[in-house]
Amino acid sequence: MDNENFSPEQSLQLINKMIGEVKQGLKDNGFFFLLWGWLVFIASITSYILLKMESEYSYYTWPILMPLGGIVSAIYGFTRMKKQPKRVKTFVDRAMAYVWIAFGASLFIVLSSGGQIGFEKVYPFVLVVYGIGTFITGGIIKMKLFVFGGIFCWILAIAAFYVTFDIQLLLLAAAIAVAYIIPGHVLNSNYRKDV
Amino acid sequence: MFKELDPLLHSQLRLAIMSLLVSVEEAEFTFIKEKTGATAGNLSAQIDKLKQAEYIEVNKSFKNNYPLTVCKVTKKGLAAFEQYVEHLKSYLTPKNSK
């Protein structure tokens, strides 16, 4: 690759090929969307069933499943960094990192202020935060499914303010299925097709 | 009229390096080597030329005792690349449409 006499057409082909190479290697496999999507889905459905059975353990699904998600995320993130270190940084990487840090911080604030704002308002606000995360992600990675998922979360958030706690759990499960699990599986199958 | 193409960019390997770098914020030497398929020696030489022209910034450090070279396109480099593509168009579009 050191020939200086190449044609403008070849030049353009080369530019296209290189830009394509970068895009190719940066596809996300949707792991985190699937992990958290399924965990929240299982936690909210289980919590709903236990609540209906009038079990006193209905709230225990969260403190068990969420730290589990945290541990799995940390292990997965660490091994992926070891196995295939990122040798390139893109604007998308940086934008995504900031979106999800903001998401985590906002979620933490909402969850920890349940006592102040009232526990019946926690899930509606959680849905608002969920919507922000996927809506912006959809815009950054140009995936409409996430954008629609975000809007869906917001619509359910409005509804969630008017219903009782048990129904809120079902809305949460529906939101996570549409905004995280389905797009997560699409991301994953696109990733597998390319690899 | 055909516009003159920047000789610094109108070279396969240097153009390949620049095309990779304009689409990312920064990339490691090994990444560029893998994507271009160039030899380390040749790649180093071309990166050096781009660096001398201030088209790219090169940062050398160590990671786990291995040398780590990170390249990044500069504003000047980006402007040169954009102009190169603009000039390239004069070769590709029919003359009467310009």
Image (cartoon, helix red, strand yellow):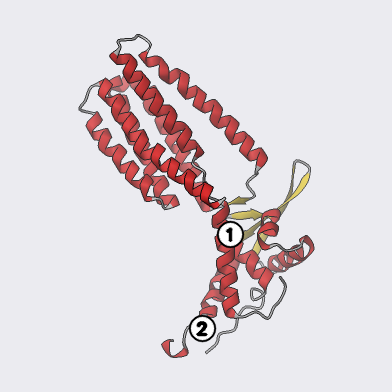
Residue shown at 51% from the left, 83% from the top:
B90
Compared with A65, A105 (above or below) is: below
Amino acid on which disc 2 is placed: Ser
Residue with the most extreme front position: A193
Q: Who is closer to the viewer here, B2 or B49? A: B2
Residue labelled with disc 2: B90
Q: Secondary structure at mark 2?
A: helix
In this image, B91 relative to B56: left or right? left
Label 1, residues with CA under 10 Å away: few <14, some 14-19, many ≥20: some
Q: Position of residue B2 (x, y in %)?
A: 55, 87
Reply above or below: B91 against B15.
below
Q: Residue furthest left?
A: A162
Location of the N terminus of chain A by quadrant is bottom right
Disc number for residue A6 = none
Tell me where residue B74 sits by quadrant.
bottom right
- Residue A76 in view, yes or no: yes
Q: Chain of mark 2?
A: B
Q: Residue at x 53, y 84 (%)?
A: B91
Residue A118 visible: no
Relative to A175, residue B89 above or below = below
The disc labelled 1 sits on which kind of residue?
A: Glu
* Mark 1, secondary structure of its residue: helix
Mark-to-mark CA distance, 2 and 1: 26 Å
Packing grade of label 2 (10 A; few <14, some 14-19, many >=20) is some
Residues at badges 2 and 1 in contact (C-beta under 8 Å)?
A: no
Residue drawn at (56%, 85%) of the image: B3
Q: Is residue B41 above or below residue A130?
A: below
Instruction: Give the letter of the chain under mark 1.
Output: A
The x, y position of residue A78, in whole percent, is 62, 34
Residue A21's disc is: 1
For residue B89, side relative to residue A144 (left or right): right
- Residue A44, image x, y percentages: 36, 24
